[in-house]
Structure formats: C-alpha cells, structure tokens
Amino acid sequence: MASLPRLPAPRRALSTIQSIRPMRPFHTVHHRPSTSPSLTNQPFKTTPPPPPPTTTPSIHIRAYHSPLHPRLPPHEYTNSQTAILTASLPHIPTHGFTTAALTRGAQDAGFLDVSVQLLPRGEFDLILFWLASRRGLLRGRVEDGSIFGAGEGLSVDEKVKLLVLERLRMNGEIREVWQDALAQMSLLGNIPLSLLELHALSNDILTLAGDAAVDATWYARRMALGAIYASAEVVMTRDPSPDLVETEAFVERRFADKEVLREKVEGVSSWVGFWGNTAVGVGRSWGLKI
C-alpha cells in the first residue's frame, strides 16, 4: 500500500499564546445617586470661573480721622517710675533735667542707680513729670482758695492772668535750667508731647478761670493762651529780676494786646455785618429774591 505524502508542519504564529500577556479587566464603577434631601432637591448650579488676576495694585485711601490711627504715647507712669520721678524733683534746681538728677532721685527712693532705665524717655520723662506735677499743684491752689480768695468781682480774663502768673512763679526755682528743658522739648521727637502738655495747661487755666465758651472761640482762646504762656517762659529764662518783674510786665502787655486785637476783630466783624445787611436790604428793595 502506498504511503500518503507528508504535509509540511504549519508555521508558528508571530506571537505565541504564551507571549500574549493577559490584560487587566476593566471594572465599571456604578455610583449610586445620593439620597440626601439637601442635595436632591437643589437644582444643578454652575460656578462661573474666577476672574483673571490683575496686576494693577489697589490704592488704599486712608481716612482723615481713623479709629485705628496710632495715638501719641501716653506719659503715664508705674508706681516705681512715679517714686523715682517724685524723688528727683528736689534735685532739679541743682542738677537740672539730667540723668544725674534721676540717679539721685532713684537713690533717695531706695532704688539702684540702674533703675533710671525704667524711664524709656530719660530726661524728657522728668520734664513731662515736672509739667504735670505743676498743673496738679495749680489746681490744688485754686481749690484751697490761695489764688483767687473769695473770687468776687474778678472776670474770666483777670483770673486767667492770675493763673498764668502763678504758674510762671512755680518755675522760679528752676528758671536757671529751664532753657535746657525748652531745648529738649523742641527736639523733633518731643514736639508732639510738648504741645500736648501745653494744650493741657491752657485748658486747665481756662477751666479753672470759669471759661464756659462752647463755640469756635473755645479753640481760639486756648491757642492764644498757649502762645502767651510759651513766649512768657522764654522771657522768664532771661529775666534777671528776683521776683520775675520783667516777666510779669511782659504778660501784662501780651494780655493788653490780646484785648486790643479782640476789639479790632469784633469791630471788623460788626463793620462787615453792617454792610452785609445793608446790601441785602438794598437788593430786596430792588426786587431781588435774597
């Protein structure tokens, strides 16, 4: 029996079954709808895209009066600072408003010499304490009646003049060193507190004299009084008389000039008011609706 012809072996596929890597099956995730009543009852909302960033800097306009505006540093003192400053006052006529007076005051109060570092402004704190203590002493003398006495028949201006002269006499024992104190008060960093103390003195004097003005003259009278007192202190430092006679004469002249100036201002105001009323009357007589 003849044998059948042998067929050729089939060629292998380019990629055998063994070379085929099994692929990871895909898993379909089914999200269950939320059953929260706060989400199912709300309509679908689209959020608009945020605006593109701008490169223009925003300009912050600061108000003229702001509650956040930094105030002037207060010159209030602790018990230790008050004790050192109070004990330093008797040393001012000898040592002036210097660190030496503060050091001796600290020693008298029972503190170490380095305790003067408790005062952040140093000698200027001693000047402020002197001014504040003299204002308190002035109020005490008015309350016990040692300045006005009965006070009958005295006008407000006369009381103001007496208070100014009394306050200047309180500087009699330290007038030799007061010029150095004025130089420290004129420094740029000390001007705000110096003006604040001058305003406090003017306000105290007018209040103790019985000034009851509530109109625009409230500010004008305090500014005028502050100017008179500040100029009188400068004159006091150059006054060689033992009883401040030249300083008192200067104050008398300044108050006289103030009265003359006030009369002139009142005269000009009356003149302007008279011609203003006259012009209004003439205009109304011509039929103008004024």
Image: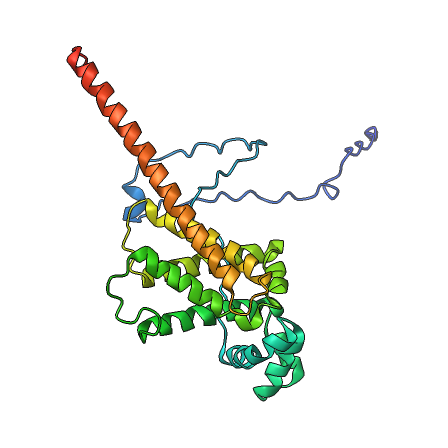
Question: From the viewer's perspective, is 115 left or right of 31?
Answer: right
Q: Can residue 73 be spotted in the picture?
A: no
Residue 137 sits above or below residue 106 on the image: above
Q: Residue 101: x percent and y percent?
A: 63, 77
**Residue 207, image quadrant:** bottom left
Q: Can residue 95 be spotted in the picture?
A: yes
Residue 173 sits above or below residue 227 on the image: below
- Residue at the farthest bottom position: 110
Say which residue appears at 40% left-offset and 49% top-offset.
Answer: 256
Say which residue appears at 66% left-offset and 74% top-offset.
Answer: 99
- Residue at the farthest top position: 286
Q: Nearer the viewer, residue 8 or 213?
A: 213
**Residue 12, image quadrant:** top right
Q: Residue 77: x percent and y percent?
A: 50, 73
Q: Nearer the viewer, residue 87 or 225?
A: 225
Question: From the viewer's perspective, is 252 left or right of 127?
Answer: left
Q: Nearer the viewer, residue 230 or 245?
A: 245
Say which residue appears at 53% left-offset and 35% top-offset.
Answer: 58
Q: How many marks?
A: 0
Q: Identify the image quadrant of the C terminus.
A: top left
Color scheme of the displayed model: rainbow
Say which residue appears at 75% left-offset and 39% top-offset.
Answer: 16
Q: Identify the image quadrant of the N terminus.
A: top right
**Residue 13, image quadrant:** top right
Question: From the viewer's perspective, is 20 left or right of 107?
Answer: right
Q: Residue 224: x percent and y percent?
A: 42, 49
Q: Residue 229: x percent and y percent?
A: 47, 57
Question: From the viewer's perspective, is 173 left or right of 98?
Answer: left
Q: Nearer the viewer, residue 126 or 12?
A: 126
